[in-house]
Image (spheres, grey):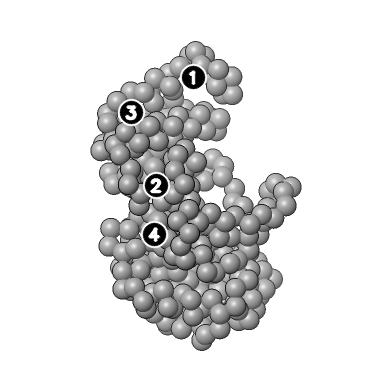
């Protein structure tokens, strides 16, 4: 039996996804629709309240613009958790590398096939693109171990959600909660992506300055533990991946009009990492060159 917690801002969307769940889940369940139209609480606070209301041992937190296409998916979820006592979080899209540099769950700069694992029909609201089937299964598995999963749909044990509540003090908006939850759970439990459940997500997410503000908060909290990977990565690979990731983060922060001090503060935090200190100086030099107009990319700022 599964409890499904949804942070809702649209009653019509909630009704549609509730019916979709009823038709596809295949096992006893409850849908806990948390109406957030008027109070406009952060998603961490809403999800923590939903956790307290859940009556079943497995909880799925999902967006209300998701439509699940796989019949009987509830049994698949239950089997994964019952067959592996170490299973802690389950998603349909996740990353095998979480960078020290501020970023989401997917690092394009990680030059490995294991940088992403996903089986998802992705729609687009912000861009005029056709729906795509985002499928990447580098190990040809039914179930892959990752560092973190996308929060469009993630399942966990209620006991874990109680022990590791969503951080509503640090993350007050609607971003970063999925990464933070996974990083909390990662040391004790497996974070997994299943390829046996297919769903459509109607929107692609808005990766803007508001998103990055929350990601910076997340990284100030977790820099001491990053980077993390489920792959066999050498220190040399760590270094070069992080150098690419930090350069991208610097360029994005300049595009979004962060001050020199704010970017400096982000870079200083990397010096606490197990990655070589040389990384900080390389990244700082890149920032200075951009700000002084000594690099072609400075034309973007």
- Secondary structure under tag 2 reads strand
Around disc 1, counting alpha carbons within 10 Å, would you say few (fewer than 14), some (14 to 19), or many (20 or more)? many
For this rendering, which residue is in front, 2 or 169?
2
Q: Residue at label 3?
A: 279
**Residue 196 left/right relative to 185:** right
Looking at the rendering, which quadrant does residue 271 occupy?
top left
Q: CA distance from mark 4 to mark 1?
A: 38 Å
- Secondary structure under tag 1 reads helix
Q: CA distance from mark 2 to mark 4?
A: 13 Å
Q: Residue at label 1?
A: 290
- Secondary structure under tag 3 reads helix
Q: Are marks 2 and 4 in contact (CB under 8 Å)?
A: no
Looking at the rendered image, the disc whose residue lies closer to the viewer, 4 or 3, is 4
Around disc 4, counting alpha carbons within 10 Å, would you say few (fewer than 14), some (14 to 19), or many (20 or more)? many
Residue 116 appears in the rendering: yes
Q: Are marks 4 and 3 in contact (CB under 8 Å)?
A: no
Q: Residue at label 4?
A: 145
Residue found at the far front of this picture = 140
Residue found at the far bottom of this picture = 28
Q: Residue at x 44, y 22 (%)?
A: 287
Q: CA distance from mark 4 to mark 3?
A: 28 Å
Looking at the rendered image, the disc whose residue lies closer to the viewer, 1 or 3, is 3
């Amino acid at each position: 039996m599964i409890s499904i917690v949804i942070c809702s801002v649209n009653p019509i969307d909630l009704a549609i996804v509730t019916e979709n769940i009823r038709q596809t889940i295949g096992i006893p369940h409850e849908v806990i629709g948390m109406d957030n139209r008027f109070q406009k609480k952060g998603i961490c606070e809403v999800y923590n309240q939903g956790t307290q209301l859940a009556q079943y041992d497995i909880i799925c937190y999902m967006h209300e613009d998701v439509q699940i296409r796989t019949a009987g998916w509830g049994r698949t979820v239950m089997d994964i958790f019952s067959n592996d006592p170490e299973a802690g979080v389950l998603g349909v899209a996740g990353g095998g590398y979480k960078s020290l540099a501020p970023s989401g769950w997917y690092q394009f700069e990680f030059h490995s096939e294991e940088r992403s694992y996903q089986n998802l029909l992705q729609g687009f609201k912000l861009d005029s693109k056709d729906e795509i089937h985002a499928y990447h299964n580098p190990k040809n598995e039914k179930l892959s171990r990752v560092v973190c999963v996308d929060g469009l749909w993630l399942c966990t044990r209620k006991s874990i959600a109680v022990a590791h509540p969503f951080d509503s003090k640090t993350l007050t908006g609607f971003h970063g909660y999925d990464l933070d939850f996974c990083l909390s759970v990662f040391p004790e439990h497996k974070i997994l992506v299943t390829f046996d459940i297919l769903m459509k997500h109607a929107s692609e997410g808005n990766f803007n300055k508001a998103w990055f503000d929350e990601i910076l908060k997340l990284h100030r909290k977790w820099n001491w533990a990053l980077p993390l990977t489920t792959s066999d990565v050498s220190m040399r690979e760590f270094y070069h991946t992080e150098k690419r990731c930090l350069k991208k983060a610097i360029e994005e922060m300049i595009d979004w009009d962060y001050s020199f001090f704010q970017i400096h503060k982000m870079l200083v935090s990397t010096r606490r990492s197990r990655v070589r200190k040389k990384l900080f100086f390389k990244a700082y030099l890149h920032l200075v060159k951009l700000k002084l107009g000594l690099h072609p990319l400075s034309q973007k700022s």
